[in-house]
Amino acid sequence: MSILVMKFGGTSVATLDRIRRAAKRVGREVANGHDVIVIVSAMAGRTNELVGWVEETSPLFDAREYDAVVSSGENVTAGLMALTLQEMDVPARSWQGWQVPVQTTSAHASARIEAIPPENIMAKFAEGMRVAVVAGFQGISPEGRITTLGRGGSDTTAVAFAAAFGAVRCDIYTDVDGVYTTDPRITSKARKLDRISFEEMLELASLGAKVLQTRSVELAMRYKVKLRVLSSFEEPDETAGTLVCAEEDIVESNVVAGVAHSRDEAKLTLTDVEDRPGIAAAIFGPLADAGVNVDMIVQNISEEGMTDMTFSCPVNEVKRAEKAMADAKDRGEIDFGALVADTDVAKVSIVGIGMRSHAGVAAKMFKTLRDEGINIKVITTSEIKVSVLIDRKYMELAVQALHAAFGLDRAA
Ligand code: ADP
Ligand code: ASP
Ligand code: MG
């Protein structure tokens, strides 16, 4: 028996008609002899709506109740997909995360999958069920409460199931026909990649390319899951989509594989902070405790024992950050002049394993941005990426300019 995992994202299950179309595809794989685990997202827009309701009800919400609400979109599509398959005479059953059970940590709103015992689903396959439809994005904590895996988490559900069940492949069906050199919504010159390495995909995802959730790529890399991204709107053939694979399996590549962007960033600066041992811990400890995902950090040169500390975080976490800093000040743990928030910034990054062996990549990036008159506010680098924080209004321009400058408009 071979198990195939097929994941359908929000746009692929946005209407009953699209669910029918996705179900037909599942039916074909069943006819090919696979037992199929289908992972579904909520219908397009539904999770955003649920998140909006939570935030409107309670701005600094209890994350356990957030999870109770936002996980519900997937329950609807799982049941509808199972019903659609049954109508096509395909033996199918739906499962919510807790029923499998998808065991996660108790980090609500960003839980990690710890284990997926396969017994319950395998027993049903043994009885003749051909398709298990699983609600993506959700699990159950050790305390028995519903958890969610962070936005885009159905990708991670899919890869985790592929690993847990030893699936032959994990196919991620979405609204683009693969992974592109940059978000095709930003430039029509973006090109589909036939293959991309796990390392590059991991960076692109963590820097904002939401085609795959970062954690899903991590899991695929660790458990050697054969991961493919393809369109749910086109008929696939053997070469369809993009294969995310090991570096060794890529023959040709550009120095820069892709350009990623993250629109909703914020830059916060604490002015007049005392420059002493332990100050970074005193600032970033409370931010971490408050669930603020700090990304870039810059500490200015110290003058007369005082410094400025700048960091970036998602724009919707600014309120939490401000409260965490004000509370830490009240408790006497830190002192600072002001907390200045710039909520109109975006992050643009270039990624490529070729950077390991090529000098001058960062310089070329900075020159390209200079030629467009774009000011850089913060820079961070790693072995295979360079990221800059810029004014949000220049984000598209920056992506397009870098895409052209690094030759991504043409094939490698
Ligand atoms: P789904 O609902 O199927 O999970 P998502 O909206 O989460 O789909 O992810 C697909 C979207 O990711 C695409 O519509 C595209 O705009 C965006 N995207 C960003 N960067 C890339 C990239 N490098 N390649 C392909 N798509 C990308
Ligand atoms: N519905 C969830 C979200 O929008 C999970 C997913 O689609 O992957 O984040
Ligand atoms: Mg997604």
Image (cartoon, grey):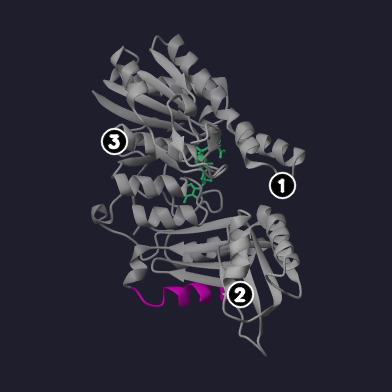
Q: Please say if the residues under marks 1 and 2 sit with CB atoms less than 8 Å apart.
A: no
User: Looking at the image, is mark 1 or mark 2 nearer the viewer?
Assistant: 2
Whether 54 is drawn above or below 272: the answer is: above
| Span shown in magenta | 358-373
Residue 293: which numbered mark, if any? none
Label 3 SS? loop
Is 372 colored magenta in this rendering?
Answer: yes
Q: Amino acid at mark 2?
A: Ile
Instruction: Report the front residue among 174 and 302.
Output: 302
Label 1 SS? loop
Label 2 SS? helix
Query: Which badge, 1 or 2, comes first in the chain's sequence?
Result: 1
Whether 356 is drawn above or below 1: the answer is: below
Task: Specify whether residue 180 is in view.
Answer: yes
- Quarter of the view holding residue 332: bottom right
Write down the residue under mark 3. Answer: 238
Q: Amino acid at mark 1?
A: Leu
Write down the residue under mark 2. Answer: 279
User: Looking at the image, is mark 1 or mark 3 nearer the viewer?
Assistant: 1
**x then y, percent, for residue 153:** 50, 40
Instruction: Report the front residue among 323 and 351.
Output: 323
Write down the residue under mark 1. Answer: 60
Lateral position of residue 57 relative to residue 25, left or right: right
User: Looking at the image, is mark 3 or mark 2 nearer the viewer?
Assistant: 2
Q: CA distance from mark 3 to mark 2?
A: 55 Å
Query: Which badge, 1 or 3, comes first in the chain's sequence?
Result: 1
Is 314 colored magenta in this rendering?
Answer: no
Q: Residues within 10 Å of mark 3 (few under 14, many from 20)?
A: few
